[in-house]
Image (spheres, rainbow, N blue to C red):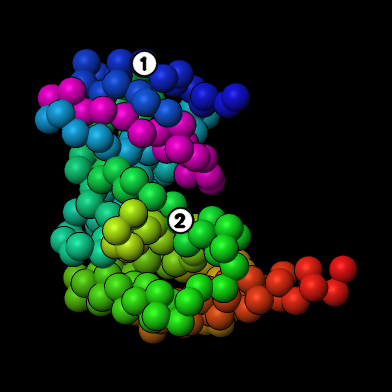
Amino acid sequence: MDEGRFPPGTLLAQRYRIVSLLGRGGMGEVYRANDLLLAQAVALKFLPAQWTSDEPTLARFRNEVRIARQISHPNVCRVYDIGEAEGATYLSMEYVDGEDLASLLRRIGRLPRDKALEIARQLCAGLAAAHDKGVVHRDLKPANIMLDGQGQLRITDFGLAGVASEVKDIRSGTPAYMAPEQRSGKEVTARSDIMRWAWCCTRSLLAAASRRIQATRT
């Protein structure tokens, strides 16, 4: 079983006790940990080990913290702090005990109409809070949408986000969910997030329906 760089039980920064590896992606590994100081569960997002000496990447990571901390809303994953442990840079954030929308769709297929509408409503509320602060997510997709056991939604991973007026690398993001203007290298705005929201929902729901149709034909 893959435990990542930090096995369960590892103590980091004399404060965080690693519980388990939650996942990994292009911007690093994410662990569940216990914050011993505040006695609560948190998620720790670490940059890949080979990137910790790359100043542009670290600057982007710090920018993620600066941007994400501007947003305070029940449908946006809260970001707490940034730090270093054993030569690695990490971001501490709210731990969501649940699963991402991509995993949910793979597990159950098409969502019931009322559930889909509720997810869409919460997602719009979280995006509106970010847009009110001038923040564009820029990588909205089912894997970045977490749902807890009570059905509460959180938008996560602002690693590719940027204040709209400061965006430099405007083509950053997951190609399959990019808005047309993002694909062509044009300016990315709040409207791009709205397009990505509609596109990711449509692709996910249609893909789930397609898998069920194919299953009935085999």
Disc 2, SS: strand
Point 26% across, 64% down: residue = 75
- Is any part of residue 213 visible from this angle? yes
Q: Which residue is at the far right?
A: 218
Q: Residue furthest front?
A: 216
Residue 15 lies left or right of residue 111; in this view the side is: left
**Amino acid type at mark 2:** Asp
Residue drawn at x 78%, y 68% as measured from the top left:
215
Q: What element carries label 1?
A: loop
Q: Is residue 33 magenta?
A: yes
Q: Where is residue 111 in the image (x, y as percent from the top left)?
A: 50, 73
Q: Mark 1 points at which residue?
A: 9
Residue at left offset 66%, top offset 76%: 209
The magenta stretch is 21-37
Question: Badge 2: how crowded within 10 Å, few (<14), some, or many (20+)?
Answer: many
Q: Mark 2 points at which residue?
A: 100
Q: In the visual, does 69 lie left or right of 178?
A: left
Q: Compared to 134, does 18 lie above or below? A: above
- N-terminal of the pair, mark 2 or mark 1, is 1
